[in-house]
Amino acid sequence: MNRFYRRAVIGSVAGLFASMVLALTGTLSHPWAALALGTAIGAIGSVPFRRRRGAYVDSLMTAGSLGVPLWALFSLVLFPAILGRSPQWDAAGMRAHFPGLVGWVCYGVLLGLLTQALEDLTTRTLGPEREPEPELPKKQRRVVILGGGFAGMETAAALENILGGDPGVSITLVSETNALLFTPMLAEVAGSSLEASHISTPLRTSLHSAAFVRGRVVAVDLPKRQISLESPAIPGMAPEPARELEFDHLVLALGSVSNFFGLKNVEKQAFNFKNLLDSIRIRNHVIEMFERADREKDSAARRALLTFVVAGGGFAGVELAGAMNDFCRGILADYPNLRRDELQIVLVHSRDGILAELSKSLGDYALRSMVARGVTFKLNTRLLDARPGVVVLSDGDLLAETLVWTAGVAPNPLLATLPFERDKRGAVIVESTMAVPSYPGVWALGDCAALTDGKNGKPCPPTAQFAIREGTQLAGNIKRALAGLPPKPFHFDSLGVSCVVGHQTACVELAVPFTDGKSLRFSGLLAWLMWRGIYLSKLPGLERKVRVLMDWTIELFFPKDIVQTIDLT
Ligand SMILES: Cc1cc2nc3c(=O)[nH]c(=O)nc-3n(C[C@H](O)[C@H](O)[C@H](O)COP(=O)(O)OP(=O)(O)OC[C@H]3O[C@@H](n4cnc5c(N)ncnc54)[C@H](O)[C@@H]3O)c2cc1C
């Protein structure tokens, strides 16, 4: 029996007997009214209270004291009102109703004693009251996203959007840095066209209901559904202990790292070109080389200081070589001891043409215009080794104090510690829904995933353009999975590709929709303006857009900045 129903029955029986006092003492002028009212009060008054076994004194006193307000309410106010009289709480009225007070208190005492006795009896015969089912808090499902790049951030933002702050789901974004780096503009930082902080957006403030955790993921325990995090080391401070974070859904969006294909010396000697710090270091180093060359008397040594080698003829390498070329030639005027012909920007590429992602005509155009601006190309040439001051190429040694590596990327090495099937690049092979096969609730996307388009079966390229669309779709798939629905396969048709090759020149190739491979090609100044317009619109945040626009405007009127920024590491 429901505990409230049970208490009401007990209370009404006790109330019926107790109300006989009311009837016998004449507290109410009509005995039947006294019985009905006493029974009702007993039933209603017992429902909220849970009595301890044998607590007679407690029950007696509580119910007895209840007699006083009941007397005031019924005897002094309600009954006179029913009879058309005014309340009788003056001294004369109270005195007249004093026997009623005794009756009500006796009623209360009796009600308390009887209710307690009946409850104890019922407990003995029927057993204790059935405890209500404990209200279990609705289990919160935890979605943990690893990596705050394009893929991870888009997944988090889209999930925030479509879940609309559902308290049943927690979203946590974990990343090493508190910034979403807008990599398409990275070369402009190295080339001193843009301020470093203007191309990265703080993740913490970009998220609303999702939590952000800054930390480096060092391990993923799939059976325990838990990840281990280390906080980034702060020089001079004791390292923080590793933390654990549990998940129900895990999103791997850890991106990629430079792949040196086992060239250990190259790895030691070369600059990476993957993140903001790399860009800052490259720019600082270029200025440093100019400063040293300015003091150097030996012309061969000066030449080596002013030779900047970029390995890799893909987008990153070409954009960096173009930006460095503009930067170096732009600041030459500040170093009167240095001659223009001593400066060399060399791009080394193992194939016979650059920018394989563009159509051949645009790739050739990019090559010609960069050569015209003074960039040296070493095509069909492989980088074999590097020593301090020497870059070893397949066609001989090149004396150069600067080498930047953009010739290969590999998915994040953390993936190698997980039992997932991976392709030959090392990317996690996922279903077209981005689900990791055989591991329910684990998903991978972006540069660290080997994903094939669910419609055309083509592999999805490791680009920001795809990573963002994958993030949006994955958020929808996670929502579906949370609701017990099957996820949907990913499909996206590339919008096109573009590349800045330096000095207000770019190549843009826009895909024509529904034509299966046809494209519109643009080059030169128009393409450069298009590039800037497209990427400015894609840069997250109005404030960042304004800052970048201002940097670009300043660049038009003032010479390149040669102040070295601080690198704390
Ligand atoms: C110089 C350059 C220029 C580019 N230009 C273009 C372009 O013009 N157009 C285009 O479409 N694409 C471009 N790309 C490619 C594009 O940047 C990538 O495809 C895209 O960033 C992939 O997104 P992602 O989220 O998978 O990885 P990423 O953006 O690399 O994000 C990975 C995230 O994981 C974090 N992370 C890594 N390891 C850990 C760890 N152990 N613990 C915690 N966090 C970790 C990183 O800090 C980072 O936030 C360019 C890339 C580079 C390097």
Image (tube, rainbow, N blue to C red):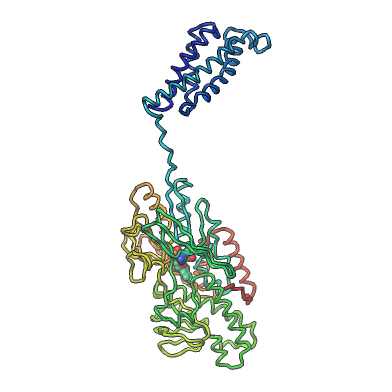
Residue extending farthest right:
91
Q: Where is residue 351 in the image (x, y as percent from the top left)?
A: 38, 80
Q: Residue 357, relative to residue 12: is it above or below?
A: below
Q: Residue 485, relative to residue 395: is it above or below?
A: above
Question: Quadrant of residue 425 in the image?
Answer: bottom left
Q: Can residue 464 be seen by looking at this rendering?
A: no
The C terminus is located in which quarter?
bottom right
**Residue displayed at 42% across by 46% down:** 139
Q: Where is residue 7 in the image (x, y as percent from the top left)?
A: 44, 24
Q: Residue 21, relative to residue 229: is it above or below?
A: above
Tell me if 306 is positioned left or right of 440 in this view: right
The N terminus is located in which quarter?
top left
Q: 409 or 12: which is nearer to us?
A: 12
Q: Position of residue 123 (x, y in %)?
A: 40, 26
Q: Where is residue 311 in the image (x, y as percent from the top left)?
A: 45, 80
Disc count in the image?
Answer: 0
Question: Quadrant of residue 565 in the image?
Answer: bottom right
Q: Residue 113, relative to residue 403: is it above or below?
A: above
